[in-house]
């Protein structure tokens, strides 16, 4: 069901775990299955300099999250927010269609983490 790239990210997830004192945190649930994902980000000058994820999700969710963290690390918040689940699926060499909903989890949690960061760090107006 899963290709080698997906299995590699599933077996050796990159950037898994929690982050101490993150600049932004986002948690979402997957309405399709009830699984949960949390993304932590560290941001410097609008660039994601570090990212971690924690999930109670399936293998596809773990692989997508691992790949997503690699995809957005070093990107600006604006660049990161524009990635789609198709980008994640393509980067993993194609997720099975019934698992596409799983690839939303990390991106949705990332968007929540960016929202949280922006709420806590409003642009300076002086
Ligand atoms: Fe729940 Fe994949 S089945 S995230």
Image (cartoon, grey):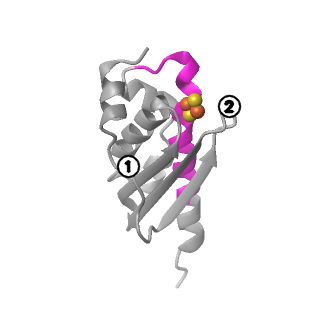
Type of secondary structure dominating the magenta stretch: helix
Tell me what residue is drawn at x 40 percent, y 18 percent.
2
Q: Which SS class for mark 2?
A: loop
Q: Is residue 59 left or right of residue 3?
A: right
Say if 100 sits above or below 118 in the image: above
State how far apart marks 2 and 1 are (Cα).
23 Å
Tell me what residue is drawn at x 46 percent, y 68 percent.
23
- Of labels 2 and 1, earlier in sequence is 1
Residue 50 image-quadrant placement = bottom left
In magenta stretch: residue 10: no
Residue found farthest to the top: 1
Badge 1 crowding class, 10 Å Cα cut-off, few under 14, some 14 to 19, many 20 or more, is: some
The residue that mark 1 highlights is 16
Residue found farthest to the right: 31
Residue 87 placement (x, y as % from top left): 44, 31
Residue 13 placement (x, y as % from top left): 34, 40
Count of all numbered marks drawn on residues in the image? 2
In-front residue for pair 15/73: 15
């Amino acid at each position: 069901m899963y290709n080698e790239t997906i299995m590699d990210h599933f077996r050796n997830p990159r950037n898994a775990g929690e982050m101490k004192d993150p600049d932004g945190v986002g948690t979402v649930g997957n309405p399709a299955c009830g699984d949960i994902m949390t993304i932590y980000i560290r941001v410097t000058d609008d660039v994601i300099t570090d990212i971690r994820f924690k999930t109670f999700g399936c293998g596809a969710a773990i692989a997508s999250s691992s790949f997503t963290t690699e995809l957005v690390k070093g990107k600006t918040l604006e660049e990161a927010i524009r990635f789609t689940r198709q980008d994640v699926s393509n980067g993993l060499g194609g997720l099975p269609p019934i698992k596409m909903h799983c690839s939303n989890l990390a991106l949705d949690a990332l968007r929540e983490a960016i929202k949280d960061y922006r709420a806590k760090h409003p642009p300076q107006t002086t």
